[in-house]
Image: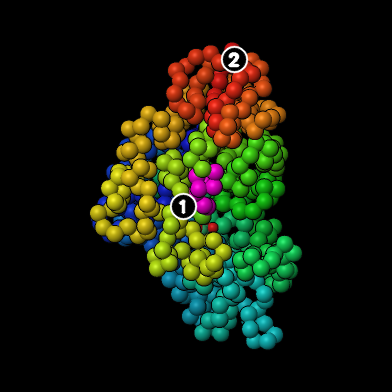
Amino acid sequence: MKWWQVGVVYEIAPISFQDSNGDGKGDLAGLINRIGYLEWLGIDVVWLTPVFPSPFLDLGYDIANFCDIDPRFGTIEEFSLLVSELHRRGIRLLLDFVPNHTSDQHAWFIESRTSKQSAKRHWYVWAEPGGDGGPPNNWLSRFGGSAWQWDASGQYYYHSFLPEQPDLNWRNPDVRAGMADVLRFWLRHGVDGFRVDASAVLAEDELLRDDPSNPDADKDTPPPQRLKRVFTDDRRESMGYLEEMRQVVDEFADRALAGEVQGKTDRIGHFYGEERPRFHMPLNFALLDSPWDAFSLQANIDAYLNAIPKGAWPNWVIGGHDKKRIASKIGQAQARNLSILLLTMKGTPFFFAGDELGMEQVEIPHDRVQDPFEKLVGGYGLNRDPQRSPMRWDGTSNGGFTTGEPWLPMGSDVAQRNVEFLKKNARSLLTLYRAAIALRKRERVLAEGEYEPIRSRNDILAYKRVGADGEFLVALNLVHEPRKLEWSGNGILLLSTYLDSDERVVTCPRLLRPDEGIVLKLR
Ligand code: GLC
């Protein structure tokens, strides 16, 4: 098995991880100082959100130079130190790769917009006005309003996201060659792979056909989602570009590509590739999106496994910088079951820094909102700041994150929900995460074995993991009352979400306690 199949992946937004210079924003030096924590927890792979020079209008996803480090984070030398310090501890590094757009401050765009004759004109998506002199068509930006921005050079340019994030023109082979060199630049710096941002939207319809209205939309639907993105998303050409990216990554030994694929599970299979490979891991958000009950979960797990090609390696994501904290949705007791589910399923587990503490959505006062999504499409609960609140290392008011003013509020529960406090508690969620990760490493069947579902009954989600080195049963009681596990057989109890029992033989059927999840090694 490959490292990216068996490894546990941890997403870090460096701005929210550890500040080292008191400016209230995390940086590379701070992150390097916290590698010991990653090692203690058992993390195998770190994925960093963008650290490149950026005006930072969109958490750094507006990149002004793909091949350098933003001074707010540090220097390229510090980046190299980060790579070597992680590798020294056997931890791999994935970088965010943002192919769809640049910042309007990128040298390519600055040159592109100088005139219609600019040598870089066709590096971006420019179009003449529509019949009425307005935008070329009805396409909408995901962040609100038309996706077309009028420019003094005499045309409109297309932006899937902010007007300050013009879309690159992937039909242009020079763009593709330029972006391939960006990948090579970081691969030569020793990174182990990438998470490809917004990977389904690289190419738009060449005829600029209008999108139809979304029949499911009503007054509560955020305006940018009131059209169906038929002509801007999931175009066949985009898939070809992903294949080219994969070829570049395959020029280097043992690297991996993960990719952001939003939307319905049934789309996800395509992103693995057909004749030619695309991503090793198109990211799967099925657990996050599922209602939290046994029937829904068993169905969503099945739908996902059914949607990926035969032989494709699954993955499971339970948090991220764009996703509401799951502990706020399912509660602290069930967050414990989720940790077991994530770490005993077949497939690569991904979680977001702070999920292991049970971090919840942090309330953001109006005047501290940072996320452009909320600023531009407010009132629909889209703000992503609540999940981006900084990591808490100790119980002081700034959680040991910074000596300055944190860039986002820390939240009101820092005193009870921080690394230092939870580490001391032998039954905390953090202790459970660490135990489950260690168990996954010790019992390789949990990482590598086959998955065999067991029919859910009595609000219990149950399945087996089966391999040459044994059989394991996982059973999770998804309600806050005792429930009978009907399955019969016995095994050694390796882990309970209660963290209160020594290894002993458990015979089933038997009652699971309220919210209890268990892992048995069958005999
Ligand atoms: C991706 C990122 C998101 C960002 C967007 C535009 O969806 O995950 O945070 O806003 O791309 O780059």
- Residue at 56 percent across and 81 percent down: it is 150
Q: Which residue is mark 1?
A: 361
Residue 131 visible in image: yes
Residue 205 position in % (x across, y down): 69, 67
Query: Cβ of disc 2 within 8 Å of ligand 1?
Result: no
Q: Secondary structure at mark 2?
A: strand
Closest to the observer, 291 or 474? 291
How many neighbours does mark 2 have within 10 angstroms: few (below 14), some (14-19), or many (20 or more)?
Answer: some
How many neighbours does mark 1 have within 10 angstroms: few (below 14), some (14-19), or many (20 or more)?
Answer: many
Closest to the observer, 237 or 223? 223
Residue 477 position in % (x across, y down): 59, 31
Q: Quadrant of the C terminus?
A: top right
Q: Is residue 85 above or below residue 19?
A: above
- Magenta stretch, residue numbers: 323-330
- Residue at 66 percent across and 68 percent down: it is 219
> Can you tell which mark lies on residue 507?
2
Q: Is residue 282 above or below residue 363?
A: above
Residue 79 visible in image: no
Q: Could you say which quadrant of the image residue 161 lies in? A: bottom right
Q: Amino acid at mark 2?
A: Thr
Residue 471 position in % (x across, y down): 60, 19
Distance, label 2 to label 1, CA atoms, is: 39 Å
Closest to the observer, 268 or 285? 285
